[in-house]
Image (cartoon, rainbow, N blue to C red):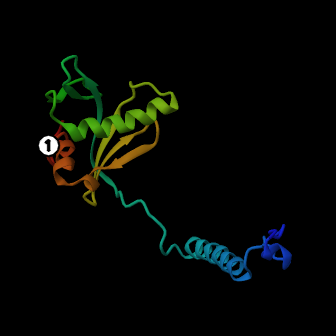
Amino acid sequence: MSRPAASSAAQQGHHHDERPPKPLLMACGLLVVFAVLATGFVTLTGIGASRDLGGTATDSLVLTFSDRDDGAVIASDFGTGEVIRIWAPGAGGFVRTAVRALAYDRREMGISAAPPFNLIRTDRGRLLLEDPSTGKRLALEAFGDANKGEFEALLPIAGETV
C-alpha cells in the first residue's frame, strides 16, 4: 500500500490566518485610549500626580565624604574642613552605600568626587541627602529610622550653631 503524498489538512486547503483576532486589536486600542485619557486627566487636574513633599529646609549642612586608607569613612564640614564624624572600617554601612550610590551617578556623568553634598532637614520631617552636581537626592527616611539616624546625627540640634 502506498501512503498519500500530502497530509489531509493540506488537502482540505487548511491555512493559518496571520492576522491577530479583532477582539485583541480592539482591546489594545482601548488600552492606548485609556492611557492617553488618564495622562490628560492627571495633567489637567493634578490628581494622582507625584509631588515634591520635601518642604522648606530648616537645617542644612554642606558635607564631603572621604575614605581613609584603613577603610574608615570621614564626613567633614565643607566650609570649615572640620571632621564631623568618622565611621570605623566595617561601620556605617548605610552611609557608605548612600554616598557611593550618589558617587556612582557622578562617575557616570563624568563629574569628579570633589563637589560636596547637602544634608537637609525639612519642616515636614524629611531628611534629604542631595548631590547638587548631579541633581540627585535621596529621601533618607525611606530607609528606616536607624539609617536616617546615621545622617541625622550629623546635623546640629535645633537652635545649636555649627
Q: Is residue 17 visible?
A: no
Kind of residue at disc 1: Glu
Decide which of 143, 150 is in the foreground and name it.
143
The residue that appears at 59% across and 74% down in the rendered structure is 44
The percent position of residue 51, horizontal first and vertical second, equals 44, 63
The percent position of residue 146, horizontal first and vertical second, equals 16, 50
Decide which of 44, 100 is in the foreground and name it.
100
Decide which of 162, 21 is in the foreground and name it.
21
Q: Residue furthest top?
A: 69
Does residue 126 lie above or below 73 as drawn?
below
Q: Quadrant of residue 12?
A: bottom right
The residue that appears at 46% across and 42% down in the rendered structure is 135
The percent position of residue 81, horizontal first and vertical second, equals 24, 23
Instruction: Specify whether 115 is left or right of 111.
Output: left
Crowd around label 1: few <14 · some 14–19 · many ≥20 (10 Å): few
Q: Residue furthest front?
A: 1
Does residue 75 lie above or below 156 as drawn?
above
Does residue 100 lie above or below 10 as drawn?
above
The residue that appears at 42% across and 38% down in the rendered structure is 132
Does residue 93 lie above or below 76 as drawn?
below
Q: Is residue 116 visible?
A: yes
The quadrant of the rendering that contains the N terminus is bottom right
Instruction: Specify whether 153 is left or right of 105.
Output: left
The percent position of residue 76, horizontal first and vertical second, equals 23, 28
Q: Quadrant of residue 153?
A: top left
The quadrant of the rendering that contains the C terminus is top left
The residue that appears at 70% across and 81% down in the rendered structure is 26
Instruction: Specify whether 110 is left or right of 118.
Output: right
User: Disc 1 designates what residue?
Assistant: 160
Q: Residue furthest bottom?
A: 23
Judging from the image, what secondary structure is the residue with disc 1 in?
loop
